[in-house]
Structures are given as structure tokens and as C-alpha cells.
Image (spheres, rainbow, N blue to C red):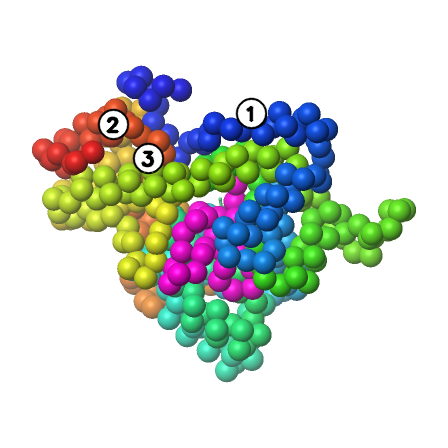
Amino acid sequence: MSENDPVQRIYLSPPELSGNELEMLAAVLDGGWIAPVGPDLDAFEAELAMVSGRQYAVAVSSGTAALHLLLHALGVTAGDEVLVPSLTFIATANAVRYCGARPVFVDSEDSTWCVDPDLLLGELERRSRAGRLPAAVITVDLYGQVARAEQLVNRCRELGVPLIEDAAEAIGADRLGRAAGSFGDAGAFSFNGNKLITTSGGGAVVTDDELLAMRVRHLATQAREPVLHYEHNEVGFNYRLSNLLAAVGRAQLSTLADRIERRRSNNRWYRSLFASTPGVSVMPDHPEGNPINWLTCIQVDDAVAGFSAGDVIGVLAADDIEARPVWKPMHLQPVFAGSELVAVSRDAVVSERLFARGVCLPSGRLGVDGRDRIERALRPLIGQVSASR
Ligand SMILES: *Cc1c(COP(=O)(O)O)cnc(C)c1O
């Protein structure tokens, strides 16, 4: 792919090579470690623990698998309820369903777009009084920004409710000096092709709880007992990441800082691009955190802007530039019809407004030419502006 080719499609978040993937893969093949165990898997896990400020990491086959294993290991089972942000990718809620449990959706806040912590705390208190505590709580670090989870972490610990941080979109971000993945009992990462770090498909669990890490590792390998014959005391899963893909992950991770800087630079550019367009606002970077801006997203208030989120997606699509609405809230998904939503007001659901007005913009390696094309495509909507590149 050449970024100066003007007919090239511009993707939302395409996978990006670090340059040393082939070399690291060749080393694995030379060593014969084409296996679900091996030195690169161990090293990748050690590096992931470092990045997230955790003691332990377990690399698995996807972010979804990481969430499923965690919920299962933390005892979530049929008939349970789990509090989950409504504004997220469906994997978060699906993992709850894999355990036979029911997701109860909680609305977002405007300052981070992540789950509203006050709303969630209030729901926990209400349920605590009613003797109906959820089996777990999941927070999601949306589009590269860590959720305001510190109070939730404390309250969940007091109440004995496990808290999982879905940090699939936020590896390398931090909040109040604490890394994405370090909030609560455990964090989950994704290395899917559209994420900041990719192994084509993959994920990880990170935690400080040694027993939890061991349990997740055990469940991810068919719950096989450490004996010569094949002995199993419970139903496990085949969810481990292969050593080959771990090598790709290590190559990717070696350029994490550059990747983050590229996303942040895109975000700054978009901010200047839209700075003088009334009715358009970029997703806020909360001052207490350092988001990685995995995707830059905007909100378009059509009554003020004179054009809609759909118009933005349309003019970009006309020039073969990919843009998408923000995640459709889970409580609006047909598959979760009839599920419960916790919101401040049913008439002003934040996640519904973000879905109606939100657009995710191309956030990968854009280059000067990519930025030019995006700016030219948007010009009819946002007028004559010249963003500093
Ligand atoms: C991508 C993503 C996941 C799932 O990751 P996969 O590796 O695709 O299974 C989970 N949660 C969120 C918020 C995500 O964006």
C-alpha cells in the first residue's frame, strides 16, 4: 500500500506493520516453536504485564475470549446479572451471555463517553440495599480513553463484586498515572486487526491476582490437569494464543510509542480541522487521563452545524474514505431487545445521542496526502479551513 496513491481507499483503522514482524516470525520458525507454547508467548506475556502495570498476563486467542475467561473464572454463571456499559463493541456483552448471564446496560457520560461512574455507583448502592448485587461489573475504555473507574474499583472491592476493565481499545493509555488494564480485578486487551497492536487475532488477560491468572491459563487450555494422561476436572476452552502470533505481537508492541504518537497526532489534526465548525465537537480527552486516541470520533449536532453525522460519512465515502457511526448502544441492539438500561433519564440517553451524532474518523497512518484528501472531502461541509498538518 502506498499512501501517496490518490485512488487508495483510506480505512478507519487498518493494521500497520512495525517492520520487524518477518524477522521475528523467521526466528520462531527456525526454532521450531510453531506451538501453543514457546519462548515468544512467555516474552509477549511479560511485556504485556509491563505495559499494563500488572504482575501477570495470559495471552489468548481474542479479546472476546479474554473477557469470557475472566467472567467464567470470576464465577459468573447462568442467571447472574453483570453491569456493562451500553456504548461498547458487542464482544463485551456477548461474553456475559456466553456465561448464561444477563447484561444490564449502563449509560455513558459526556466527559469521557465511557460508562457514567456516578450512575453505576448509584445502581450498585440500589442493588446492595435490595440484596441483588451483580455478579460482576465491566468498564470499557472507549476509543482509547480509560474510563473513570477508580471509585468503582474501591466500591466494588468493598462490596465483593469483581470488576473487569475491557481495555481492548486502549492499550498504552493511562488515567491518574495508572495504565489501561490496571483497574479492577483484571483487564482484557484485544489484538484484532483493527486495534492499535494486532496479531491478526488475539487478546490477553492482565491481573495482579496470581490465582486468577493461573485459573485463566488453565481454563484457556481445556482445563487440562498437569499429569501425563489427559485428565480434566471441569469443562475448559481452547483459547490460547499461538507462539507464532505472540512473535508478531512482540514485533508490534516494540513500536507501541510510535503508534500512539501517530494516533494522537491525527487527533490534534482533526481538532484543528474542526476548530471553527460550529456544531462539531471532537470526543473529549479527559484532563485526568492520557488517551491514546485509537479512533478520533466527533459529534455532529445537525441543528447547529447544518449537516449531519450521516452527511460526514457520506462525503467521505464518496471519496473512498471509510468513516462509521460510533458503536450502536447495546440496549438498542435487536439481540438484546428487552434488556435493562440504567440511565439518568430515559428521555436523554447519552449513548443514544452519541450514536445518533457520532462519527469515527480514519485514524491510522494517514500521511500528508491522506489528510489532504480527508480535508478536501470535508470542505463542502465545514467550509474553507486550513488545518496545520
Ligand atoms: C475489539 C473489542 C473487543 C473484542 O476483541 P476481539 O479481539 O475482536 O475479540 C472487546 N471489547 C471492545 C470494547 C472492543 O473494541
Query: SS class of the residue under badge 2?
Result: helix
Q: Residue at x 60, y 65 (%)?
A: 80
Q: Residue at x 15, y 45 (%)?
A: 275
Residue in front for this viewpoint, 5 or 52: 52
Query: Which three-letter amino acid code belongs to the residue tagged 2?
Result: Val
Report how far apart the C-alphas of labels 1 and 3 lie in the structure: 26 Å
- Dots 2, 1 in contact, CB < 8 A: no
Q: Which mark is residue 368?
A: 2
Is residue 64 visible to the viewer in this orientation of the structure?
Answer: no
Image-quadrant location for residue 295: top left
Q: Does residue 360 sit above or below 367 in this rendering?
A: below
In the shown orientation, is residue 312 left or right of residue 95? Answer: left
Residue in front for this viewpoint, 13 or 287: 287
Query: Which three-letter amino acid code belongs to the residue tagged 1?
Result: Leu
Q: Which residues are magenta?
A: 166-192
- Dots 1, 3 in contact, CB < 8 A: no
